[in-house]
Amino acid sequence: MQAPISVKDKKSFIVWFLNHYQLKKRESVWILNYIVNHEDILKNTHFVSDAKFCPRSIVMSSYCSDQIPFRFYKNHVVTTDAEKSFHDIRMNRHKELYIQLNFKNAHQTPNYVSVLEDNPFIPDEYFITKKDKEIAQQLLDKVLYESKRDMLKRAIDQALDQNDRHAFEQLTVEMQQLEVNRKSQP
């Protein structure tokens, strides 16, 4: 869990951003200026990636980005009408608002990264699919099996070298059980 970003830091970032980038839609500038001047809104504002997954979010792009100019998402409804989003922000000033800003090298810009928060609404399988998890588990199982098998082989060889019949029998049973377990796995 990350520490909350202060209102002061968010305000500083927005001012910096507006001074360094030109947004594709002029209403985006109005919205950011409105947010900067209302701490109660700013307190509930979060800068995130993949804002489309959030229940109430805005995506804004600068001219240096090839992304969409503006989108407002609210409970799976999407609009490009900035005035509707502005009205929603004014009427719901105490509700969480998530903002994604698209501009060149955004995730390499310290000012942006300093206010960027983890998006709690990204689905679990967005980055890693179920198939990826299965493949990773199969690989892990194989590596663990081979490691255990090699360790047992070395221990059996050592028991034979030392003429330790009891250790040899015990290790052989373990090896057989390992092979049975391996064959019973899907």
Image (cartoon, helix red, strand yellow):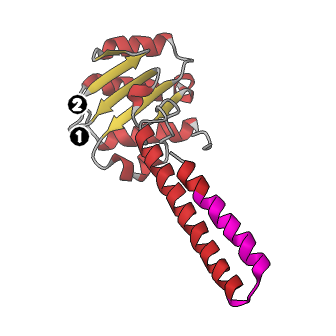
| Residue 20 visible in image | yes
Q: Amino acid at mark 1?
A: Ser
> Of helix, strand and loop, which one carries label 2?
loop
> What residue appears at the point 31 percent right and 44 percent down from the top-left corner?
20
Q: Quadrant of the N terminus?
A: top right
| Displayed quadrant of residue 173 | bottom right
| Residue 129 visible in image | no
> What residue appears at the point 44 percent right and 41 percent down from the top-left corner?
13
Of residues 72 and 174, the one nearer the viewer is: 174
Q: Amino acid at mark 2?
A: Lys
Q: CA distance from mark 1 to mark 2?
A: 9 Å
Disc 2 designates what residue? 24
The dot on residue 5 is: none
Of residues 7 and 46, the one nearer the viewer is: 46
> What residue appears at the point 60 percent right and 76 percent down from the top-left corner?
153
Left or right? Give the position of 51 relative to 103.
Answer: right
The image shows residue 172, relative to residue 87, as above or below, that is: below
Specify start and end residues of the magenta stretch as a single range: 161-179
Magenta span: chief secondary structure: helix
Task: Farthest residue to the right: give it.
Answer: 166
> Of helix, strand and loop, which one carries label 1?
loop
Disc 1 designates what residue? 65
